[in-house]
Amino acid sequence: MPWDTRTAEQQATRQASALKAQLVDAVGPFSPFWRERLKALGKTPSQVRSPRDLATLPAVGERDVCADGDPAGAAALVLQVGESGWALHTEGPRLRRALASRLVRRGSYRGVVEADTRPTSFVFAGLALRFPVASTRSDLDVVARAGARLWQVLGLTRSDVLVCALPLLPSAALQALQLGAVGAGSPALFPGDDTDEVAAALQLVPATVLALPTGGAATWLDDLDEAGAALGSVTTVLLVGAPSDEERAEVGEALARAGMQALLLAVHAPDGHRLLWGECRQGGPGLHTYPDLDLVQLVDPETGETDDGQDPDEVVITQLGMRGSALLRWRTADLADSLDTAPCPGCARTVPRVVGVRRRALVPDVELRSGRRGVDLRSVSAALVGRADLSDWRVVLGPSARSEAYDVIVHVVPNDQEDATDVAVAVARDVRSAAGLLPTQVVINEPGTLPDGRRVSRRVHARG
Ligand SMILES: [Zn+2]
């Protein structure tokens, strides 16, 4: 049964066994971070048998792993495996093959263990901080295999030719497109993000697919058109990074200005993940995921816990079958409207689709007075949720009244018996320790006078 037409029951069975393998044989014994975390939660890996069990684990994000904002903490996500540990936890057939080959070829056993467990390549991730995500050789195979599937979802074949204008920094999206092209057998050129170089690449090959970073894609098309780049053969434009409706519309207009007929399709790798999700060529809504390789769940962005689904939720992923840095209940900082598990109305694939994604909505990159940085609104919320000294609160992020720079203003309603000044001081201190930034201001509000704005989450609002 192909990966994308399994029934819900077939998917559930496979997910349960992949989840068991990932937890009991990989993450549980070998991830320093999760070993400690599960112990602290009073759970053993074998108690987490289903997505429902998994949903009882609090989700974690970069700030949980890199406490104090030190990216070195991300090393604790990388599985640490010795040869003897591998033998204990690897599946029977693979172990038998490896042991058999050890008899005839010296060093081959170590080769198998290392292919399976040794990180050999890295991409950078992180929103409010930057940290490396490690892949083993077998992880790269998974990325390539998922890439071949992405080509199917996007309606591309091996006769398609890709030119990609992403910066050549090691990012998950770049790696996934490079290995995806390998997996699908498509010629692909990655000239970097210089307009002249991309235009030159388009002269060299009859590109049918042009991949552009979503932010700035409209400008890219205008610039390439002005540079006289050969865009006539392009039938698909990939927007790398889930676009908003406005961004999609802007790119649509730029396509029209350049006289192009290409179809716009979004691809997106949530932060920390190594697989690109894509939209199908038949126009079904949402990003198509890989249920046997990643388990997608939604949580309340303010608490990291499963909620009633009233407001937009944060996308949380659990990787299945990935070693290297192994992510479990990973908070991506993307918001989504819903996770649709019905068959896609466009392509009829039965894979879950993440609908209405707003990339990095919970860690916006803004210009503060102290400089440009990602503001982790989840950490700011974490310092405020469930406090005994507050009856309610709001966080408002927006341009300040006097300058272009953004303010992070925390509005609080102290409980009756609390001293307002003490509360303001305590809130400022706790926000700084949880999020690594001091609020611009802590405002004491009377009950019923909290400000309103465009909602990011229930109590976090954006202004301007
Ligand atoms: Zn579809």
Image: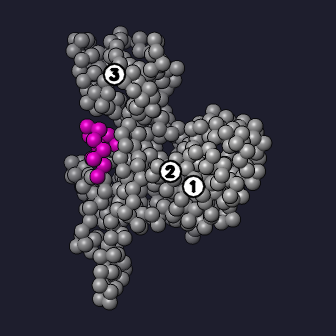
Q: Secondary structure at mark 1?
A: loop
Residue 168 is marked as 2
Q: What amino acid is found at the position of numbered circle 2 in the picture?
A: Leu
Judged by depth in the image, the label closer to the viewer, 1 or 3, is 1
Q: Residues within 10 Å of mark 1 (few under 14, many from 20)?
A: some
Q: Which comes sooner in the sequence, label 1 or label 3?
A: 1
Left or right of 3? Residue 69 is: left
Q: Relative to the observer, which residue lies in front, 76 or 22?
A: 76
CB contact under 8 Å: marks 2 and 1: yes
**Residue 105 horizontal/vertical position (percent):** 32, 86
Q: Which residue is mark 3?
A: 439
Judged by depth in the image, the label closer to the viewer, 2 or 3, is 2
How far apart are the two marked residues, 1 and 3, measured between alpha carbons? Answer: 41 Å
Q: What amino acid is found at the position of numbered circle 1 in the picture?
A: Phe
Q: Which comes sooner in the sequence, label 2 or label 3?
A: 2
How far apart are the two marked residues, 2 and 1, measured between alpha carbons? Answer: 8 Å
Residue sitting at 35 percent across and 46 percent down?
Answer: 131
Tell me the magenta residue range.
Answer: 61-75
